[in-house]
Image (cartoon, helix red, strand yellow):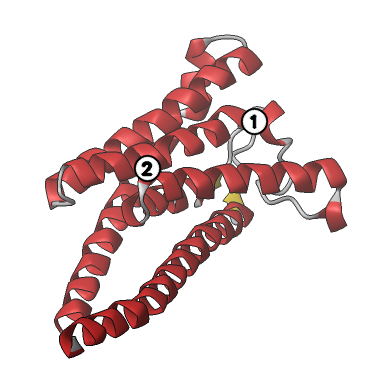
Amino acid sequence: MRSSTAHTLTATSAGPVAASALSVASAMRGGAVLAFVALTALAAQWQVWIPGRPVPFTFQSLAVLLCGMLLSPREALAATLLYLAAGSATLWTGWGGLNLFTPGSTGLAGPTGGYLVGFAMAAPLVSWLRLRTSGNMVGLVLAGLAGTVVVFAAGVSWLSFVVGGWEPAVAAGLLPFLPDALVKLIVAVGAAVGWRAIAARGSKS
């Protein structure tokens, strides 16, 4: 009887503890999603325009790769969709002159709209591929490459309608960015590997 009572008390006390732990974990995941929304918005504020070309250099795609490398597919999709929604809201409302896409950008309807849509496609894809390959170095590189290809494919496809053909779209929206994309891929993979090492060390301590 005492054993049964003790088991009942243990189970009863474990319920609130488990619920509390679940709430904390959910809050942390939500915080991570919002953090990547903010990171992508901040990355968009640094830009370099090439005269005569409709697409600037920014750090947005790096933030998107990191999002896919570190979040779950669902969280990565949520972060990129929230970013698109927040960026569109700043354009619609003209809120303080703030533009969460890039200064001077016209958002989804502008020349860079395809890249923005590509972000929401690439981040969950990178995350999904990373999980399917156990997150090893080769898997991270392949996942990052796939995400980069998706961003450029979506961006150049939309840009081709804006500039009047595939050849000028590739010249303006792909070729100048290939060295930049390679550096971002290396940084994203390195960050993912470093984060895994830190997380593994923390779990052992």
Disc 1 crowd rating (10 Å Cα; few below 14, some 14-19, many 20+) is few
Give percent across and percent down for residue 21: 39, 74
* Residue 29 horizontal side relative to residue 93, left or right: left
Q: Quadrant of the C terminus?
A: bottom left
Disc 2 crowd rating (10 Å Cα; few below 14, some 14-19, many 20+) is many
Does the rendering let one see residue 169? yes
For the residue pair 32 and 41, the one nearer the viewer reads as: 32
Give percent across and percent down for residue 174: 44, 28
Name the amino acid type tagged 2. Ala
For the residue pair 104 and 80, the one nearer the viewer reads as: 80
Q: Residue furthest top?
A: 165
Q: Quadrant of the N terminus?
A: bottom left
Name the amino acid type tagged 1. Gly
Residue denoted by label 2: 181
**Are the two marked residues, 1 and 2, in contact with CB atoms closer than 8 angstroms?**
no
Does the rendering let one see residue 175? no
Asked if 131 appears above or below 55 in the picture, the reply is below
Any mark on residue 39, and which? none
Residue denoted by label 1: 52
**N-terminal label among 1 and 2:** 1
Residue drawn at x 50%, y 52% is 59
Give percent across and percent down for residue 3: 16, 86
Residue drawn at x 42%, y 45% is 74
Give percent across and percent down for residue 184: 36, 50
* Residue 39 horizontal side relative to residue 162, left or right: left
* Residue 172 horizontal side relative to residue 90, left or right: left
**Label 1 vs label 2: CA separation?**
21 Å
Callout 2: helix, strand or loop?
Answer: helix
Callout 1: helix, strand or loop?
Answer: loop
Residue drawn at x 35%, y 82% is 13
